[in-house]
Amino acid sequence: MTAGATYVPIATQTISGTSTTNVTFSSITNAYTDLVVIFEGATVAQVNDLTLQFNSDSGSNYSYTRIVGYGSGQYSDRTSNSTSISITIGSPGTQGHTSILHINNYANTNVYKTMLLRTSNTNYGPGAIIGLWRNTSAINAISISISGTTYSSGSTFTLYGIASA
Amino acid sequence: MPILGVIDSGKSGHLVVPNSYYSIATANGTGSSGTITFSSIPQTYSHLQIRYMAKGTSTAGGYPTSSNLYFNGDTNASNHSSHNLRGDGSSVAGGGGPGADAPFAIPGSYGSWSSSSILGVGVIDILDYTNTNKNKVIRTITGADANGTGGVLLMSDMWINTSAITSISIVADSTYIGNWSSNSQFALYGIK
């Protein structure tokens, strides 16, 4: 067995001011096996979704399945042939939202990319999301966007790289 | 090192403690075996994490399918207690109990899953694996999506044994998974 320290912070973006609607990590190196993105923050007003795209692809090449628990029940839903993947639940707003996004084998050009997410909307409940990007390209850019409002100042997005032995 | 990158209460700076997460080993599927084993696991970490991308070779129907996580060669299912919460895009269900399998929600090669490009993914946390004073607790988040079908699953498992974990075997369901495909990959990490 070989061993080495990994789970390396690649970049952090901390929102300053109240004009940002998109956060993009670009020029992502292929040096890792998996990527992890951690979002902790809020939006200035309530928003339907934070939406995820890879490599600036805005085609209908995404799909995702969610499981959600909230104050009085639970549900699971699916979106197919979508132009992005939702990485939130329950219309996040000013009260805060956390998402931990795993993108395993992001540079493997033989497979479509599947992402796995744990999320929590402090004003709604927890959820988990599995998402597919039907593209075999290595992921070199990750964009997380909102529409109709902006990210709250102080919201953070951090990208990590994990390299396997 | 927070498990799964659980974040602190701060709003700035890095959220994972540097030099606390180590790659131990990686195992790839071969297409001819349904068992992945990590053995001689170092006892120098606090927790273990397995990150995987996987699918099975079986063309027999059904999703999600189950697999088993065995420790130290103990294949007795009655030494496990497993529970899960899963969503399939239209309904939510919970299940499990004493002796239950570990439903990893990894697809075989059936129907919508026949494309070799579509695999399931997951993250397994094995907590306090060297502590000989308590049974071992495992949690998993896993799932797969095939643009119109799929599911996501949260699972807890207890191995009713106080031994330190020195080996881990991930054994595919023989009917619905078959063998681990050659593009499956399981990576084991240690967390200080």
Image: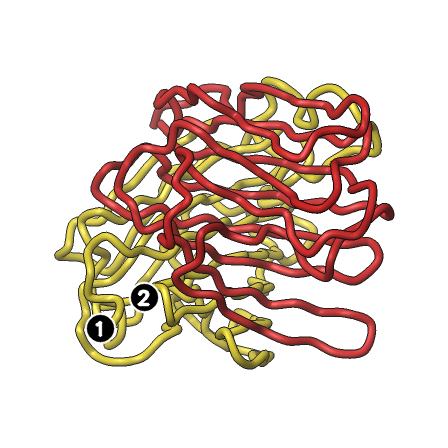
Identity of the amino acid at label 2? Pro
Q: Is mark 2 on a helix, strand or loop?
A: loop
For the residues labelled 1 and 2, say whether their Cβ atoms are less than 8 Å apart.
yes
| In the image, residue B117 above or below residue B83 | above
Point out which mark residue B152 bears: none
Q: Position of residue B54 (x, y in %)?
A: 31, 53
Q: Colour of chain A?
A: red
Q: Position of residue B52 (x, y in %)?
A: 39, 47
Q: In which quarter of the image is residue B17?
A: top right
Q: Chain B is drawn in which colour?
A: yellow
Residue neighbourhood size for the residue with mark 1, other residues' Cα within 10 Å, grouped as few (<14), some (14–19), many (≥20): some
Residue highlighted by disc 2: B107
Residues under labels 1 and 2: Cα distance? 8 Å
Residue highlighted by disc 1: B110
Q: Where is residue B94 in the image (x, y as percent from the top left)?
A: 60, 79
- Is residue B31 in sight in this rendering? yes
